[in-house]
Amino acid sequence: MQVVRAGPDLTEAAAGILLRSLAERLRDKPRVSLALSGGRTPWPVLRTLARADLEWKRVDIYQVDERVAPDGDRARNLTGLTSALLDQVPATVYPMPVEGLDLEAAADRYAAELPEVLDVVHLGLGDDGHTASLVPSDPVLDITNQRVAVTQPYKGHRRMTLTFPAFERVGSILWIVAGADKTSMLERLLAADPTIPAGRVPQERAVLITDGVLGS
């Protein structure tokens, strides 16, 4: 995994990496796919990316994970994504369908919508070692034949999430990790520690950008 220590310039640097990754693929393909995570860290990055000169009409945006909550709820990742990026660009958006009663069937439908290979995937890192909504001890960690699944309740919500099989075939992954509280988990991620969910994501074709929590 390539590591970029961006310090206070994390927002601009991460937006630049995403822009270059998308632009490179747009030179070779008629459409590209971008899968985005939630959390607080990416919103400034996505607001910066929204101002970039990119052929957004050729970009398909998917969600990495989503809380099971009503449309427009502040807990929804889609709410933040819409404000930061989706309202600003003419991309095609594929929201995770988390409002129906049969969530497992909805997860299967979303998996069928995913391209065979996700071109660019953004991931974050939780202070418990989770990424996407692949959280410690959840049964979805053991899934090997589904690309989308529904978790048990975690911090008040069930979640729909991409699973490990979804990350096995990607063009590139950009990890964006900020905050001193992530230091120990970041070190375990870089060591590909399989005892935390993030450590099980393939590190080939991955770039990690941090605000300096690794120290000097």
Image (tube, grey):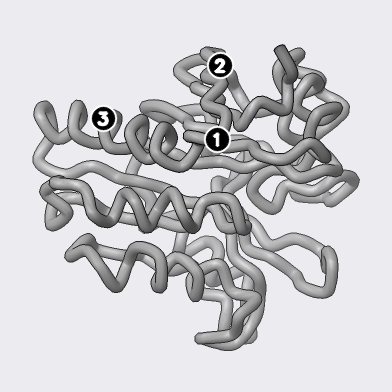
Residue 126 appears left or right of 111: right
For marks 3 and 2, the one nearer the N-term is 2
Q: Quadrant of the N terminus?
A: top right
Amino acid at circle 1:
Pro
For marks 3 and 1, the one nearer the N-term is 1
Residue mark closest to the camera, 1 vs 2: 1
Q: Nearer the viewer, residue 53 or 107?
A: 53
3D distance between C-alphas at marks 3 and 2: 16 Å
In which quarter of the view is residue 100 placed?
bottom right
Q: Secondary structure at mark 3?
A: helix
Amino acid at circle 2:
Val
Percent across and percent down for residue 137 are: 90, 46
Q: Secondary structure at mark 2?
A: strand
Q: Which residue is label 2 attached to?
A: 3
Figure check: 39 above or below 177? below
Asked if the residue at tag 1 contacts the one at tag 3, i.e. Cβ–Cβ closer than 8 Å, the answer is no
Q: Which residue is label 1 attached to?
A: 8
Tell me the crowding category of disc 1: few under 14, some 14 to 19, or many 20 or more residues within 10 angstroms, Cα based.
few
Residue 14 appears left or right of 202: left
